[in-house]
Image (cartoon, coloured by chain):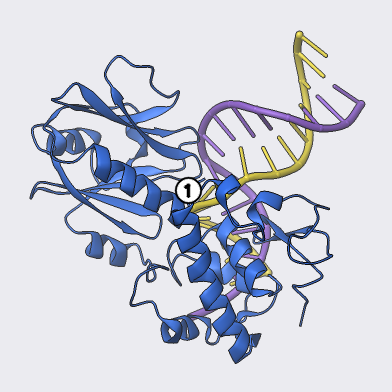
Chain colours: A blue, B purple, C yellow
DNA sequence: ACATTGACCTGAGAGC
DNA sequence: TGCTCTCAGGTCAATG
């Protein structure tokens, strides 16, 4: 599930629920998912402290633990957060459980274990070490930076949009959506886009990510002409008379409209 | 250096 | 019902 907009919503959720409460206990239930630290060290860093703020970069969420450092969360394809009163039924695949002094807990659930939990002294250092590109929604990621990202890239534009080293945060769904809104074929070589297309794609990308966050990632709340609620082979295109087609790009299912997303 | 594939993990749903 | 196959919004190491 989680791409940039999902993680942005998780951040809002965490900020609204889990800040400034003493952490009474921590259960690392899937220690094999802990990277960059031993599960025990991670636990000890958290216990007795409190979450103070959070920062998102791409699909990563960082949570500051007083002045000790930052908890790192990545949600893979199936991760999410759940804040609840202790004793209430918890989700099925809890990998990390943080108990607060107020009788509530924050659960990190990740069915497929493709996410990770970790520890870092500083999110920016972490992003650099992981070779993450600029966050796709950062103010500094302007049209000029986007042009630089595309420059000299012969690969398909959709693959590049999903490449976290080029720009961070975009995954399969929102790469498709941005290309759909911009009217660009997902298989177009990145450096073959003309000036107008680059501008259109940049605008579409930012708008799509912001809209998804504003809709709290609920497809039923998305605008009428979005691809997301129509991601099915043969579905009617919400923009024109075309039918949605499905191809495979970079090993991922790619949905697009062959009518208004023409090949060069 | 860059681009694409397969492996990793688990579960749901389709088809026989 | 049970089996097999495919698919799922993630990333990384290995390959071309």
Point out residue A62 in the picture as x, y percentages from the top left corner: 26, 51
Point out residue C10 in the picture as x, y percentages from the top left corner: 50, 52
Q: Is residue A242 left or right of residue A24?
A: right
Image quadrant occupied by the C terminus of chain A? bottom right
Task: Rate crowding at label 1 as few (under 14), some (14 to 19) or many (20 or more) other CA atoms within 10 Å.
Answer: many
Q: Compared with residue A39, is residue A229 higher up or lower down, i.e. above or below?
A: below
Q: Compared with residue C13, is residue A185 higher up or lower down, i.e. above or below?
A: below
Q: Is residue C13 left or right of residue A156?
A: left
- Residue identified by numbered label 1: A2
Point out residue A165 in the picture as x, y percentages from the top left corner: 43, 69
Residue A162, visible in the rendered structure: yes
Q: Is residue A83 left or right of residue A162?
A: left
Name the residue: 45% across, 37% down. A113
Name the one closer to the observer, A51 or B11.
A51
Residue A27, visible in the rendered structure: no
- Which quadrant of the view contains residue A10? top left
């Amino acid at each position: 599930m989680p791409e940039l907009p999902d993680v942005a919503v998780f951040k809002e959720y965490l900020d609204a629920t889990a800040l400034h409460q003493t952490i009474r206990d921590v259960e690392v239930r899937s220690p094999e998912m802990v990277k960059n630290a031993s599960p025990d060290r991670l636990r000890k860093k958290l216990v007795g402290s409190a979450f103070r703020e959070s920062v998102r970069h791409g699909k990563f969420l960082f949570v500051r633990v007083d002045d000790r450092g930052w908890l790192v969360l990545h949600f893979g394809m199936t991760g999410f957060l759940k804040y609840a009163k202790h004793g209430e039924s918890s989700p099925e695949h809890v990998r990390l459980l943080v108990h607060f002094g107020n009788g509530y807990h924050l659960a990190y659930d990740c069915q497929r274990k493709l996410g990770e939990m970790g520890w870092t002294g500083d999110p920016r250092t972490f992003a650099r070490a992981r070779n993450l590109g600029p966050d796709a929604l950062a103010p500094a990621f302007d049209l000029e930076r986007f042009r630089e990202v595309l420059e000299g890239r012969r690969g398909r534009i959709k693959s590049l949009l999903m490449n976290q080293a080029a720009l961070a945060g975009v995954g399969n769904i929102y790469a498709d959506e941005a290309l759909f809104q911009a009217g660009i074929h997902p298989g177009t070589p990145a450096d073959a886009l003309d000036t107008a297309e680059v501008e259109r794609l940049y605008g579409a990308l930012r708008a799509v990510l912001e809209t998804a966050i504003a809709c709290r990632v609920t497809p039923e709340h998305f605008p009428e002409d979005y691809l997301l609620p129509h991601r099915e082979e043969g579905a009617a295109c919400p923009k024109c008379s075309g039918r949605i087609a499905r191809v495979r790009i970079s090993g991922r299912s790619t949905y697009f409209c062959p009518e208004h997303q023409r090949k060069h």
